[in-house]
Image: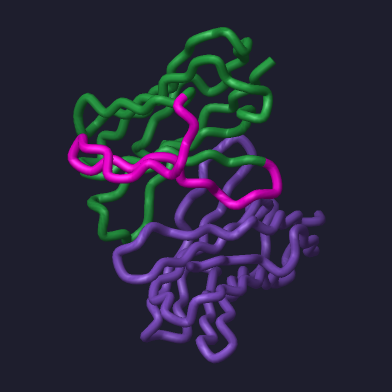
Chain colours: A green, B purple
Amino acid sequence: ETGVTQTPRHLVMGMTNKKSLKCEQHLGHNAMYWYKQSAKKPLELMFVYSLEERVENNSVPSRFSPECPNSSHLFLHLHTLQPEDSALYLCASSQDLVVNGYTFGSGTRLTVV
Amino acid sequence: GESVGLHLPTLSVQEGDNSIINCAYSNSASDYFIWYKQESGKGPQFIIDIRSNMDKRQGQRVTVLLNKTVKHLSLQIAATQPGDSAVYFCASNIGNEKLTFGTGTRLTIIP
């Protein structure tokens, strides 16, 4: 257990469904991140939050909607996804935006059917 | 911008031998480098890092070498064990910018 917990571990959803991914960290970190990991591709940064404010949105389609209600929790709301959105979604946190390495969760394996 | 790449997508090593995983980066201004290990079903886990003012750093059974002249980074794992089987990523950044990740090398330890 790294201190960053993601749920669910696996999710299968239809293209018309709405679901949410949850991330929780108890490390006292101030920055949280969503990454997409697809086969044979580098990790793709999706969103960055610092002190509950979104500081970066890397041209992510609007069918992905992040939410950060407090510095310990991060959500990724999903709706009308496409099959190409199937991937491992990783949450990470760091002490602050001055990077000295991230702590990653175990990810949510998402399959869109 | 920065790009980071690994030289080999897969590497097989006999148990007990040493393994070397390589990584190249494009931006000579990169000043911080990290190696991550990702086991099956888990997220990336920090292994070791190095700053650009160093050329070598050692941890437990792991050594990271940085060659800034050719913009090359390597991870050496001594006396590999079955538990070392995983995908290894390098990542780098410049100043306070976000980390840029490589594609990963899958290391398989042969018993």
Count of labels shown? 0
What is the quadrant of residue A70 in the picture? top left
The residue nearer to you, when weighing A9 against A75, is: A75
Q: Is residue B27 visible?
A: yes
Looking at the image, which residue is at 51% across and 86% down?
A: B68
Along the horizontal axis of the image, is A90 left or right of B97?
right
> Relative to residue B44, is residue B109 drawn left or right?
right
Q: Quadrant of the C terminus of chain A?
A: top right
Quarter of the image holding residue B110? bottom right
Q: Farthest residue toward the bottom? A: B69
In this view of the protein, can residue A106 be seen by the observer?
no
Q: Position of residue B83 (x, y in %)?
A: 64, 50
- Does residue B90 lie above or below A39 as drawn? below
Q: Is residue B69 above or below residue A70?
A: below
Using residue B48 as the reference point, say whether residue B15 is left or right of it. right
Q: Which residues are magenta?
A: A39-62
| Residue B20 locus on image (x, y percent) | 67, 72
* Quadrant where the image shows the N terminus of chain A: top left
Residue B109 to residue A92: above or below: below
Residue A57 covered by magenta stretch: yes
Q: Nearer the viewer, residue A4 or B93?
A: B93
Q: Residue at x 53, y 23 (%)?
A: A9
Q: Position of residue A40 (x, y in %)?
A: 70, 48
Relative placement, left or right, of A25 versus B26 is left
Query: Camera-side residue: A37 or A82?
Result: A82
The answer to whether residue B3 is magenta is no
User: Is residue B80 positioned above or below A69 on the image?
Assistant: below
Q: Foreground: A37 or B88? A: A37
Q: Residue at x 21, y 37 (%)?
A: A53
